[in-house]
Every structure is written in structure tokens, then in C-alpha cells.
Image: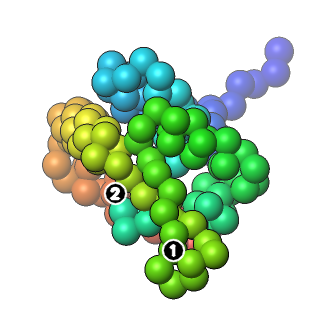
């Protein structure tokens, strides 16, 4: 019989991400049933002052075509709009609408709830240590 090994850290991080992200997704879906998990790539990587599609796709590590489809969908739903980029009138900036700002508030509230639950599980010191450790991993990799 082969020995079983504990899950790899990468697998644990991914599973933890999925479970915590699900809480945020559920809040978005409760706000609007048309919000899909894929939309989180847009909300997470947006810049509030506006962002070009190519930069948004780059930040999300997606093709511009795939990101464009998500932006089109969120624009159709009233969360985003495209406007001329003041730095280059030929280019477009993607910005949040008022509805998009409202959705962000719902998302931030859900994220705050996740943080409260993690702090309750780990304690404030444990949460601070987790934050520091994850920040180090992000900086080094």
C-alpha cells in the first residue's frame, strides 16, 4: 500500500481560495443573479479611476478577447461603461457606473465578513501572521 502524502501547499491555498471566494460570489449573486464567478476577474483588477482593456486583461492574466467579453457583459448589465481616455482620445477607459460602485460596496462587505471569520478562526495574531506570510509569498514569487 502506498503512503499517502499531505496535500501540497499550492493545493491547500487553492482550496482555501475557492472556499473563501465562494462567500464573496454568493454575496454578488444575492445582489444580482446575473453576476457570474468569471466577473470577479474584472471587479478584482479594475482601477477605480479607469483602466484600458489591454491593461485589465494583463492584470487578470487573460487574453484581451476573453476580458473584452466579460467587460461587454458587465457593461450590458450596467456595472461598467467605456469612455474616451483623456490621455489618448482614440483609446477607451473602462470605468465603474454608480451600479458598479454599489456592487463594489457589497463585495467589500463580503470580503470584510470573510476577514472577520478568518480572524475568529485564527485569532487576530494568526490573521496577522497569515497576512504577513501570504504577502511574503506574493513578493518572492
Residue ID at (57%, 82%):
88
Q: Nearer the viewer, residue 65 or 59?
A: 65
* Residue 104 visible in image: no
Local crowd size for mark 1, using a 10 Å CA cut-off: few (<14), some (14–19), many (≥20): some
The percent position of residue 128, horizontal first and vertical second, equals 25, 57
Residue ID at (46%, 33%):
77
* Screen quadrant of the C terminus: bottom right
* Foreground label between 1 and 2: 1
Residue that sits furthest to the top in the current view: 1
Which residue is tagged 2?
131
The percent position of residue 75, horizontal first and vertical second, equals 50, 42
Q: Is residue 110 left or right of residue 79?
A: left
Q: Nearer the viewer, residue 36 or 5?
A: 36
The percent position of residue 46, horizontal first and vertical second, equals 46, 58
Residue ID at (26%, 36%):
106
Q: From what the image shows, is residue 45 above or below residue 41?
A: below
Label 2: which secondary element = helix
The percent position of residue 70, horizontal first and vertical second, equals 61, 41
* Screen quadrant of the N terminus: top right
Residue ID at (66%, 49%):
67
Which of the two discs, 1 and 2, labels the residue nearer the N terminus?
A: 1
Which residue is tagged 1?
85
Amino acid at each position: 500500500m502506498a503512503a499517502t502524502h499531505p496535500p501540497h501547499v499550492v493545493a491547500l491555498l487553492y482550496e482555501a481560495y475557492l472556499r473563501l471566494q465562494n462567500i464573496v460570489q454568493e454575496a454578488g449573486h444575492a445582489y444580482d443573479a446575473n453576476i457570474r464567478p468569471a466577473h470577479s476577474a474584472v471587479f478584482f483588477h479594475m482601477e477605480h479611476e479607469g483602466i484600458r482593456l489591454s491593461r485589465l486583461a494583463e492584470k487578470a492574466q487573460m487574453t484581451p478577447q476573453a476580458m473584452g467579453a466579460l467587460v461587454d457583459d458587465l457593461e450590458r448589465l450596467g456595472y461598467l461603461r467605456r469612455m474616451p481616455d483623456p490621455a489618448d482620445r482614440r483609446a477607451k477607459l473602462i470605468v465603474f457606473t454608480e451600479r458598479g460602485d454599489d456592487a463594489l460596496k457589497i463585495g467589500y462587505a463580503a470580503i470584510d465578513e470573510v476577514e472577520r471569520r478568518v480572524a475568529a478562526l485564527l485569532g487576530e495574531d494568526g490573521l496577522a501572521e497569515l497576512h504577513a506570510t501570504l504577502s511574503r509569498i506574493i513578493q518572492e514569487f
